[in-house]
Image: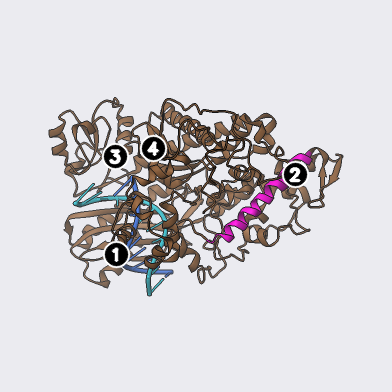
Chain colours: A brown, B blue, C cyan
Amino acid sequence: MSSEDPPNASPNDAVKRSRYTHRQLHLLRQGSTATPLRAIAHIDLDAFYAQCEMVRLGTPRDTPLAVRQWESLIAINYAARPFGISRMMTAAEARKACPNIILQHVATFREGEGGRWAYRDDSFKNIKTDKVSLDPYRAESRKILKTMKEALERWSTNESDGEIHRFTHGLSAALEKASIDEVFIDLSPLVYIVLLQRYPELRPGSQDGDRDAELPPPPTTAVQWHPEDCLIDLDLHEREEDDPDWDDIVMLIGAEIVRAVRRAVWDNLSYTCSAGLARNKMLAKLGSACNKPDKQTVVRNRAVQHFLGGYKFTQIRMLGGKLGDQITTFFGTEKVSDLLNVTLEQFRAKLDDHTASWLYGIIRGDDRSEVNPRTQIKSMLSAKSFRPSINSLEQAEKWLRIFAADIYGRLVEDGVLENRRRPRVITLHHRTAQTRSRQIPIPAANTIDENLLFELAKTLMRQVMTDGQPWPCSNLSLSVSSFEDGVSKNKAIEGFLLRGDQAKSLHQGSRPRDADVSPNEPLPPEKKRRIDDSGIKRFFAQPLSGDNPVTDQENPQPKEDQDDTGLPVEASELEADGNTMPQYTCDRCSRPIPEHEREEHDDWHFAKDLELQERQEARDAQQQSRPAASSSSSRGSGTRGKGGRGSRGKPERGQMRLAFQ
DNA sequence: ACGAATAGA
DNA sequence: GGTCTATTCGT
């Protein structure tokens, strides 16, 4: 049984103790994927493009509206749905079904009108000269994300106060932008704060040092759910009358936070969204689609079997494509409930080991994938389909100009001007009978501007044309990718984001910084946890020595010549400022610690132990979170950059630091 | 490193 | 169902 499954409680026991342990509780603050007490939210904007247009136009909520792209509809608001309008309809059909519907065309770029998109009354007549722009929606998406982050931030600072502050300061929720209108949030650290705030008996130190001891039961016999929370029915053998355990309380608190986030989005920006709340991403995502619009759905642990059993597995993330089709063929069913009868061995006979064990777990509600605090995009693409096809280089180049302008504008938003980020590769895709693509490096010496992108695109176009038959061309696209962090960004990081480093210098004078910037990681094949800064190091603002889990694993004790007292940064700063403080020597690490920091330091050891334990478990269970994740770990060799640039070896590093600006 | 394929809104 | 975007896979 995986450790995500709660241990069985014998039903006849009066609940004297919780099913959950202190260890499972305290893992919450690290965003650990290994605890069944985790709280993950998935938030999905309702009919997003349609709402964007409603907000922009000031359309009342009860007015039917759809977003139009040429003759088809790409988003339909909830007021229009009772008329039977769906995405497969044409504009004419929609108007017939609902004469009063607002059909708003998306913004477009127009040939010969510079690189600016605009909303144009006649764009639907100009499929030949216009190109769709999704920029307005990207901009709204950014605003919404920012509002959500602020709401989460407020929550953590409000709650993490007073006596528990030393256990909880610095904790925050990881937020992953899953698409233009969806986010995952790992609420676990915030829920942890609230739990400690409301239930003093859960605070560290109250368990007499035995982390595997069960928690005391929650001091309630019934959970008071908010009237607007939609609950998934419990599994057949579970009863609503049974006393709640801490996982129920976790969901209750999570629901409160999600409600606050959704409320903030509504109050500040007038967007409604739907949310799912569960112990992992997969369940949260299924949950958010259960009650729409403007509702939130809670999938309690005790409801998971019942909930999942009713689905086709092709609804589960990653199973909607060819993999799902294969599985359907192999086992002759699309139902989760049927697949539950398939043994792991039977899965292994048809699928590779990783996929087999991932699938075995996922249909049982076990999903260990992490919420990856990623906000920055990895590539930008601008494309156009031609109906009818185009037949000359001259025609093609007009579109390349627009692609270049589109992408350049987005690069500016992303900070190319300030040298924060810069793509290294540009690619041209070209479709005739088949799709062909060519890519070249963007010369590092050049300043990226619209014209450079255009010139590179033309170069690629020439290459594509010599490769084969270029006409008639039905689709053309230009993209930039392989983003790298610019110089000024590194300065920014060193200047005011790596507080751990600051504290380090402050504490022990100057110390060579090379180790911080050079790619010195003896990188393990990348069992590397994707999001170091959602782990314990974020809590403690650890300096970079903690950046590499492997180093940590193999050298649990920091080297003597480095400052790694394990103190929170704030403590280090205090130490540097004040000079005559009573000290004691910690018997765990033999370091001098100010007396008034004793408790905090003990907490640090406690958390550090948990961290090591978690890693041990991660190694033991060589199980990956997703089937797709496996290949990147087996590839690793030969991808090290030659000049030791290391941006390949340390993916997303800048992102981790600057995740939320 | 490159081009193709897959996934999802 | 067609379009558009983004990421991962295979060599």
Give the residue at mark 1: A461
SS label for mark 3: loop
Q: A529 above or below A76?
A: below
Residue nearest the observer in this picture, A116 or A261? A261
Q: Amino acid at mark 2?
A: Asp
Question: Which badge, 4 or 3, comes first in the chain's sequence?
Answer: 3
Question: Mark 4 or mark 1, which is nearer to you?
Answer: 4
Q: Is residue A133 left or right of residue A557?
A: left
The numbered mark at residue A602 is: 2
Q: Are marks 2 and 4 in contact (CB under 8 Å)?
A: no
Q: Residue at x 38, y 58 (%)?
A: A342
The numbered mark at residue A140 is: 4
Give the residue at mark 3: A118
Q: CA distance from mark 4 to mark 1?
A: 33 Å
Q: Which residues are magenta?
A: A597-622
Question: Which badge, 4 or 1, comes first in the chain's sequence?
Answer: 4
Q: Amino acid at mark 4?
A: Glu
Q: CA distance from mark 3 to mark 2?
A: 59 Å
Q: CA distance from mark 4 to mark 3?
A: 15 Å
Residue nearest the observer in this picture, A452 or A277? A277
On the same chain: label 3 and label 2?
A: yes
Q: Are marks 3 and 1 in contact (CB under 8 Å)?
A: no
Tell me the subunit letter for badge 1. Answer: A
Tell me the subunit letter for badge 2. Answer: A
